[in-house]
Image (tube, rainbow, N blue to C red):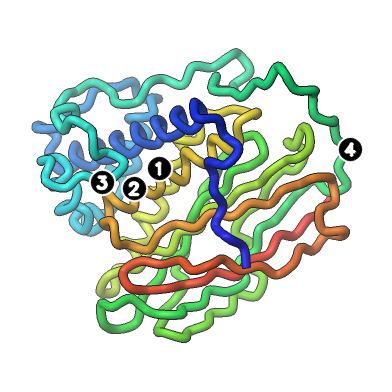
Amino acid sequence: MAAPVDFAAGLSPAQRQAAKAVARDVVAAAVKGALHAIDPARYPMEAAPDSGDMRIARAIAALPPKALRRIRPRIVAIGDGTRMPALLKNMDVQGFRKARPLLRPVERDGIDRPVIKVVDRDSDPPPVPAPPRYTKAILELRAIHCVQETGGGGADEIVFGGMLIGATGNSNPIDAFDAGDFDSGTYADFGAKPIGRYNLKLIENYPGHLYAIFMLVESDSDDREVANALTTTMSVIAVVAAAYFSGGLAAGAAYAVAEAISGLIDSFFGPDALRHYGIRLTFENGDPFGGPIGPKMRTGDITGEGATYRVGYRWVLSA
């Protein structure tokens, strides 16, 4: 069993603070985008078309109307200040009613990398790895086990999605899909379903790390399309958080993404919804398994809404 990764471990207090601030601002921008979609006159937006605010607003605007209706009560309550997600608890809701952007621009250094970096000038440089034996890593979904279904009555209709964070902090969504119906005790076998690919050539020195975040979203009353759209949109928004980090701070990107997803789940579905779960693969050398096939793994308990789920997965390496 793989314990959930503490993405903050190894980050300095300043790095943790910076990553959490990015996550907070991204979640605030998502709430603002949803408020704008619901009531554009009360919640105006003015930002550059390629800004993070507008990328998030476009992702929210692309939601099907039924999805926006599902999250509307919680989003309106946040706008009114009557229910604040934990990540936004100290935010002045008047900021939602101002047209100005909530996200600062991602400043770049000329090689298409953001400027939030980790530099340790007091330590020796890490060893440069030999040419990698493997150039790609594939993350496979093997199974989803429902230990205990939610308490809402009837089978749980689960949509699976999430995020991939590579060795340089680069990120991509896991394509959300309908995982099926689950009652207590249901074990869904997915064989060896590929859900993510990583470029191992980006590992510049050891140790190197790959991260993934799993999301299980329980849909309501046959609205799988809504759950799928919301899961995909949360992943697209989380990519914006990762954009503030560069090669030396992959852990910072993972922490910011995890915090952003937590805040988005709280904002869209409420604090009792199924939580996300983070995993990590560490490369101490170019052949972490002594061969291309990693061991069969499973998460610990993924809980929420009275339910408990576990996810089986495996890493596979290839040339």
- For marks 2 and 3, the one nearer the N-term is 3
Residue 85's tag is: 3
Q: How many marks?
A: 4
Q: Nearer the viewer, residue 99 or 269?
A: 269
Q: Earlier in the sequence, mark 3 or mark 4?
A: 3
Q: What amino acid type is highlighted by mark number 1?
A: Ala
Q: Nearer the viewer, residue 220 or 255?
A: 255
Where's residue 276, x and y in %? 45, 57
Question: In the figure, 167 relative to 175: above or below?
Answer: above
Count neighbours of disc 4 (C-alpha within 10 A) and say few if under 14, some if 14 to 19, many if 20 or more: few
- Which quarter of the picture shows residue 82? top left
Residue at 14 percent across and 53 percent down: it is 73
Q: Is residue 244 visible?
A: no
Residue 253 image offset from top left, x and y in percent: 53, 36
Q: Is residue 43 visible in this depiction of the protein?
A: yes
Describe residue 224's horizontal placement relative to residue 205 as left or right: left
